[in-house]
Image: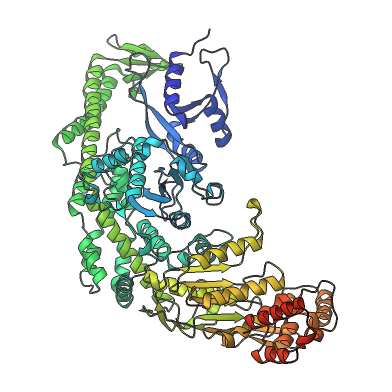
Amino acid sequence: MAELTPMMQQYMETKKEYSDCILFYRLGDFYEMFFDDALTASRELEITLTGKNCGLEERAPMCGVPYHAVDIYLNKLVSKGYKVAICEQMEDPATAKGLVKREVVRIVTPGTNLSMQTLDETKNNYIMCVVYIADRYGLSVADITTGDYFVTELDSSGKLLDEICKFMPSELICNEAFFISGLDIDDLRERLKITIYSLESWYFDDAICVRRLKEHFHVSSMEGLGIADYSCGIIGAGALLIYLEETQKNSLSHLTRLTPYATGKYMLLDSSTRRNLELTETLREKNKRGSLLWVLDKTKTAMGARTLRKYIEQPLIHKESIERRLDAVEELKSNAISREEIREYLSPVYDLERLVTKITYKSANPRDMIAFQSSLAMLPHIRYILEDMQSPLLKKLWEDLDTLEDLCTLISSAICEEPPLAMKEGDIIRDGYNEEVDRLRSAKTEGKNWLADLEAEEREKTGIKNLRVKYNKVFGYYLEVTNSYKNLVPDYYTRKQTLANAERYITPRLKELEDTILGAEDKLYALEYELYCEVRDIVGREVVRIQNTAKAIADIDVLASLALVAERNNYIRPKINENGKIEIKDGRHPVVEKMIPNDMFIANDTFLDDKKKRIAIITGPNMAGKSTYMRQTALIVLMAQIGSFVPASEANIGIVDRIFTRVGASDDLASGQSTFMVEMTEVANILRNATKNSLLILDEIGRGTSTFDGLSIAWAVVEHISNTKLLGAKTLFATHYHELTELEGKIDNVNNYCIAVKEKGDDIVFLRKIVKGGADKSYGIQVAKLAGVPESVISRAKEIAEELLNADITGRIKDIAAGGHEAAVKTKKYDDVDLAQMSLFDTVKDDDVLEELKNLDISHLTPIDALNTLYQLQNKLKNRW
């Protein structure tokens, strides 16, 4: 029976240990893949599939990638959700006895990818661990490229989904029970593009998790980490740490703190609201341009860009914290010269967070260290400018900003200004840093002079005018003589190699020089590498100081960006209140106004409170600006709560705990959900989770079904929200159901507003201005005309509209509301809905019931008739307004 070759046996043993990974197996200058891995990799990477003799009857499928380009191929596989194990040669093949020793040095997964070339520097690359135990979720999140590491605990799948949408991890690891927790795992994989793995049960063992956290953070108890109350969260954080240690094969010394957080500390934003408000990307194209982040992001550093994204995704809900940010932004806005100086010094600052991670991983090359040093050189200037700032937050950032001058001096004195990328080929250490390096470098330089002298001397001696001293890695140094001078070669030359048109020789003197020069060179390169590693390790030991400074720099960058945007875009500082009042004068949509040329955006006012102005019903035609107006209100509130100035002439913002939006919908055909089902699911989520301190943005509720049902649902939703015992949230409610304007007089906290429209014959002009009162027309046909619908269709639509006018629900309701009867409808249609469905809108008065009772002839009523009559009268009383 055929047996595998020794090399393939070694491969199979390694593969067995990492069976869930694609194994990149180092063979010389290539990483090779075999068998199923080769089939997968050749397909996904579009590289040639070949075969290799492995000792079996059939050749093993094989493909490979060159080691110097491995990152490109590795990132392609990881971005598609694969795990890749990197198996390196642990000894030099030239000196190894027998089979070269190989080991897996790292496992790369979507959430542990460290490649700075492929990761978006403006976004964190999070990995999340979720453990589901007894209806609770322990959640831990980390970004190993920056050292961020968080933990929390949740009590519902809805809250967990909000956190997943907030962090948008590229990878999620979990226990088996998570798959039966009720969350739609396929939706997370398909829609959110998250790679999800379940881990073996031992990862989630309480004792193991606690022990690993204690060992890593050098604490004696969970109280020392401040997470003793997170019993479920501790398991999530411990399992994540164990998983990271197993995949990184590294001490993870840059994970210096585990930060517990409570979801109640920030405004909660569900996935629907994040999408609809286009906070970090546009709804359709998924581009940054056109989002709120695009408007506010004028940051200079990658750290600042990531922090601003966090600000936007996690607005504050405590007044004191918001005011601290606003004070800092105001001071930087009013000190434009200092602000611009700070921004100028921030420009050359590289990504300190990710650079220090590379340093602690020992993968930082000399150029990374110089980039790090040039960034540190900017810190004293930034700190000097901050010294004069008075706002509490800027004062604190000034204190937190360690200028790290000792590390900057160390690197600049040790490492050359323009070092090579390679770490083991010399020219790294600066002259004067180390005596031995200077001596060996001198020997290396002198050696070149010695060789030049030898070459001149041998030419003189032999008369061979074109004699050259040359070098290659195989033969070392040699004398090269062309065939035309071969007859002049002396006896003491020893032939080394024959070429087509020349001969290569060596002499005892050249051999002696070679030993001296190459010995010095080898020693020099080894010493330079050793000293470089020493410097890198010294810097790596200061990871806590560096991370603290990086956080301070990121916050300074964000505050300066918000100040600049406020100045350029004519934003004002909002007042912040806790009494539930939202008052905006001349509010503008921050994104739309940037898209419209020549300051043509029409500003509008908003007033909502917890009393008589709780709900605004907004009517008006499509395209008139209802959605823009409502979104701008939500964005202004959100901007205020992240500590930004806002686009308005005045703003007094009552802190809201959540913003909910229900804006438009599309069929979710993949999961079998219609537009209406999606809409109702979102409405259900809002009504269940909103509080009286929430802000609701509801656009066209009920339009996905029949007019009667849709109107009834919309009406009932407004009623529910307006009732302070049930909800009582501040709400902007846009609708085409003009009948809802009837609620203004019936519910004391509902108010009507509409978008002003100017009519010019059959044409209309949108004035984009919100005015008091309700619209009585939809202008649908005029909008169709504006959109370019053919004139013949427009004319026919007018005719049909005229014919349907009397049968229209609007006419019927107005007639019934005025005290008329069903007979007012001219023509009875076969599909007319029973008017009993419309009892919701009846205006029956007590007097009507009394009159009907007076006229009853009880003596002629059978018992059944009497019961039916009593039932009808009781219904009329129940449904009156």
Q: Is residue 528 left or right of residue 746?
A: left
- In this orientation, does residue 603 appear? yes
Res 793 quadrant in image:
bottom right
Q: Where is residue 575 in the image (x, y as percent from the top left)?
A: 36, 80
* Residue at image location 31% in from the left, 19% down from the top: 463
Q: Where is residue 488 in the image (x, y as percent from the top left)?
A: 34, 13
**Residue found at the far left of this picture:** 435
- In this orientation, does residue 835 appear? no
Q: Is residue 315 above or below residue 544?
A: below
Q: In this view, does 312 lie above or below 606?
A: above
Q: In this view, does 66 lie above or below 647?
A: above
Q: Is residue 327 left or right of residue 179?
A: left
Q: Is residue 318 above or below residue 19?
A: below
Q: Nearer the viewer, residue 91 or 5?
A: 5
Q: Which colour scheme is used?
A: rainbow
Q: How many marks?
A: 0
**Residue found at the far top of this picture:** 1
Q: Which of 493 and 77 is in front in this view?
A: 77
Q: Which of 689 and 753 is in front in this view?
A: 689
Q: Position of residue 878 (x, y in %)?
A: 63, 80
**Residue found at the far front of this picture:** 859
* Residue at image location 66% in from the left, 76% down from the top: 622
Q: Quadrant location of the C terminus?
A: bottom right
Res 391 quadrant in image:
bottom left
Q: Nearer the viewer, residue 392 or 92?
A: 392
Q: In this view, does 261 lie to the left or right of 531?
A: right
